[in-house]
């Protein structure tokens, strides 16, 4: 009986794949950025290459692999194996990704939203262990959530539960990648932070970001904003406060609606820490019923960048067990 599964975490800018054994132990991993901004055919090719590379890196034959789990950003209907929409990658509407990968790999494949996979990884092996009503929320290229209730992933009627990033918090706000205005993701994610930073630089405001990124930048990373903020730059500090504030509004919606006992925060921007999290927690507590303040334990991820990969592999292990 095959002992291993492979987990793949497809993000807006990075693919991470890992061979995962029992207890969530990662035997080998590989990352790729070849797919960023590319259409489905290129993303699928990069995914297949990542799976083959990590299997070879672990020294395993195809017969050693029981199944592959894939986390994908956007609206995913896991039961049907479809990517319904994706804000971070182009041309994915109603794409049968699971079927495409199963045909190419000749292995069982489970497909789910990337945040669902990360939530499951944290629930099983990370900061979510022991929680009964868990919400994992990522602050990265985008913003999304995964929900585990009484030991089961909650997917919703169309498989898209947890898309907190596309909750409208300002109907007259900036255009979101989904086509609506004023979504959480218009303010609280890496893409939004970059857009706001570029706008401030182009307006000619005095800021260290001009020196770090040039007078007309196309993109400014969260790391650059955090670096400038740490050096006392007012514009950068205001940008982090804005992103943190709207992320806190997202958390307040989660607390009011789901009443979780634990919220796990992951994603690259979460590493910024207090300059972003202090305004986040302030906004959270200002926008929930007073009786709910402190009702959810809020912790950082323990698995970080591996959460989605490990969670996807664990879901694949469950799938393999059900088809044995």
Image: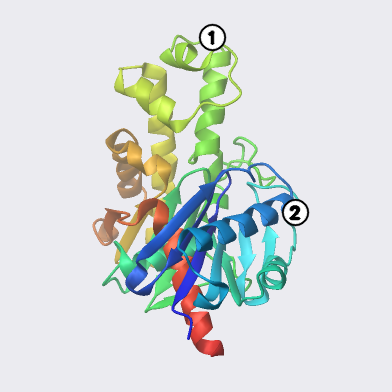
| Residue at left offset 37%, top offset 60% | 255
Which of the two discs, 2 and 1, labels the residue nearer the N terminus? 2
Vertically, is 2 above or below 309?
below
Q: Are marks 2 and 1 in contact (CB under 8 Å)?
A: no
Q: Residue 129 appears at what percent x and percent y?
A: 28, 69
Position of 217 with respect to 252 (left or right) is right
For label 2, count other residues whose C-alpha is less than 10 Å away and answer few (under 14), some (14-19) or many (20+).
few
Label 2 sits on residue: 41
Q: Position of residue 158 (x, y in %)?
A: 63, 71
Residue at image coords 54%, 69%: 69
Q: Residue at x 76, y 51 (%)?
A: 91
Residue 277 percent coordinates (x, y): 32, 41
Check residue 204 in the rendering and tell me which mark sits there, or answer none: 1
Reply above or below: 15 against 194: below
Give the residue drawn at x 54%, y 44%: 185
Q: Secondary structure at mark 2?
A: helix
């Amino acid at each position: 009986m095959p002992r291993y599964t492979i987990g793949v975490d497809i993000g807006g800018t990075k693919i991470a794949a890992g061979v995962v054994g029992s207890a969530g132990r990662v035997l080998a991993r590989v990352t790729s950025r070849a797919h960023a901004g590319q259409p489905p055919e290129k993303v699928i090719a990069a995914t297949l290459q990542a799976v083959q590379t990590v299997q070879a890196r672990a020294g395993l034959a195809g017969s050693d692999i029981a199944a592959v789990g894939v986390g994908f950003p956007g609206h995913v209907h896991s039961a049907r194996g479809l990517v319904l929409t994706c804000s971070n990658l182009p041309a994915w509407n109603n794409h049968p990704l699971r079927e495409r990968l199963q045909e190419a790999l000749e292995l069982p494949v489970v497909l789910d939203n990337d945040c669902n996979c990360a939530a499951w990884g944290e629930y099983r092996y990370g900061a979510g262990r022991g929680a009964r009503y868990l919400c994992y929320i990522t602050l990265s290229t985008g913003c999304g959530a995964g929900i585990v209730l009484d030991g089961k992933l909650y997917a919703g009627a169309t498989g898209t539960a947890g898309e907190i990033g596309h909750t409208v918090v300002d109907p007259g706000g900036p255009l979101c990648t989904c086509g609506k205005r004023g979504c959480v993701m218009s303010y609280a994610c890496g893409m939004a932070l970059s857009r706001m930073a570029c706008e401030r630089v182009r307006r000619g405001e005095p800021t260290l970001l001009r020196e770090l990124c040039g007078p007309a930048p196309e993109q400014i990373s969260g790391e650059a904003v955090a670096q400038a903020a740490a050096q006392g730059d007012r514009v950068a500090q205001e940008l982090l406060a804005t992103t943190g504030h709207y992320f806190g509004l997202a958390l307040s919606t989660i607390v009011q609606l789901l009443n979780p006992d634990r919220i796990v925060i992951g994603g690259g921007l979460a590493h910024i820490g207090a300059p972003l999290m202090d305004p986040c927690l302030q906004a959270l507590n200002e926008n929930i019923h007073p009786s709910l303040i402190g009702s959810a334990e809020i912790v950082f991820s323990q698995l970080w960048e591996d959460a989605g990969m490990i969670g996807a592999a664990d879901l694949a292990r469950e799938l393999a067990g059900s088809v044995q």
